[in-house]
Image (cartoon, grey):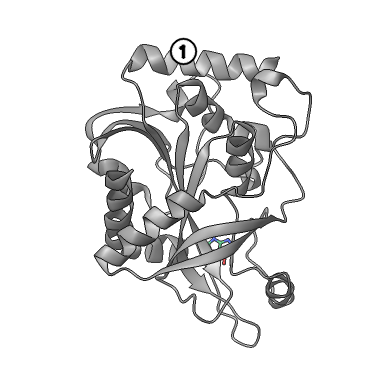
Amino acid sequence: MELLEQVRTAAEWIRKEDARPFDLGIILGTGLGALADEIGAARIIPYGEIPHFPESTVKFHAGRLVLGELEGKMVMAMQGRFHGYEGYPLRQVTLPVRVMHALGIRRLILTNAAGGIQPQLVPGSIALIRDHINLMGANPLIGPYDPALGVRFPDMSEPYSAALRRLARQAAAELKIELHETTFGAVMGPAFETEAEIRMLQILGIDTVGMSVVPEVLVARQLEMELLAVTAVTDQSLPGAMNSVSHEQVNHVAAELGPRMRALLRAIIRAL
Ligand code: HPA
């Protein structure tokens, strides 16, 4: 199968570049890439060099893999991710998650920027994803099946590990960082939401909305990986209080949040 061939080729290529065994995968979203700069003994590989990896086409996504040590763990960090709105099929968007799994990684921390659509989720808030609703109208698991892809019908009763969320809450409490828990709505984008759409998302019980994470989560769950997702709330829109949003603002607020986000992520990784 072509997808499995691509995964194997990319994984073997990376293993030749860096044979160290990995403990953890990290995906760094818009404006959150700076954590990768804190990785020690780093081997940095631009996505363009890795066979079958798409290229990052989005500003504020560095587009490289950073392999090395962080808080005593060997990590594979994606500094920048791929999105459906870039035109990549979700099977391609999520290829790196399969490659991480092929390299022995069973735990994944995802980060993203998202809009807050509940009053308490003001820009600058940090939130765990407790659950999600997939509103992308697409799923990376659709297509021909081979058992080597993972399970055909992934269990989604607890996609975001309750144990890892507990650990994250403890880390946040020790650092005196307020940490929300949210239901995340994944949309395809790239347009931000209308007021009517925000109203609809609220009715559905959604707290934060963004254009990533869920495709990666679906593939990681197919592969039965353990997941934690941490969101930087970069903007807020509420019915009757719509704010204009720009990609620049999203990046700016995410970067401003950076030090708190990095401290939290490092404390979580330390405690793993
Ligand atoms: N909507 C969708 N995606 C986003 C937003 C938003 O408000 N902010 C950051 N990513």
- Quarter that holds the N terminus: top right
Residue at x 48%, y 18% (from the top left corner): 11
Residue at x 38%, y 56% (from the top left corner): 168
Locate residue 156 relative to residue 247 in the image: left or right: right
Residue at x 33%, y 63% (from the top left corner): 172
Ligand 1 in which quarter: bottom right
Give the image quarter of residue 205. Answer: bottom right
Q: Residue furthest left?
A: 41
- Quarter that holds the C terminus: top left
Give the image quarter of residue 117. Answer: bottom right
Locate residue 95 relative to residue 108 in the image: left or right: right
Q: Is residue 226 visible?
A: yes
Whether residue 95 is situated above or below residue 162 in the rendered picture: above
Amino acid type shown at disc 1: Glu
**Residue 182, x across and y down, in percent:** 55, 65
Q: Residue furthest bottom?
A: 240
Q: Is residue 54 visible?
A: no
**Residue 68, x across and y down, in percent:** 28, 30
Whether residue 94 is situated above or below residue 195 in the rendered picture: above
**Residue 83, x across and y down, in percent:** 59, 44
The residue identified by callout 1 is 12
Instruction: Find numbered disc 1 in the image and state the secondary structure of the residue it sits on.
Output: helix
**Residue 155, x across and y down, in percent:** 68, 41
Whether residue 4 is situated above or below residue 268 in the rendered picture: above
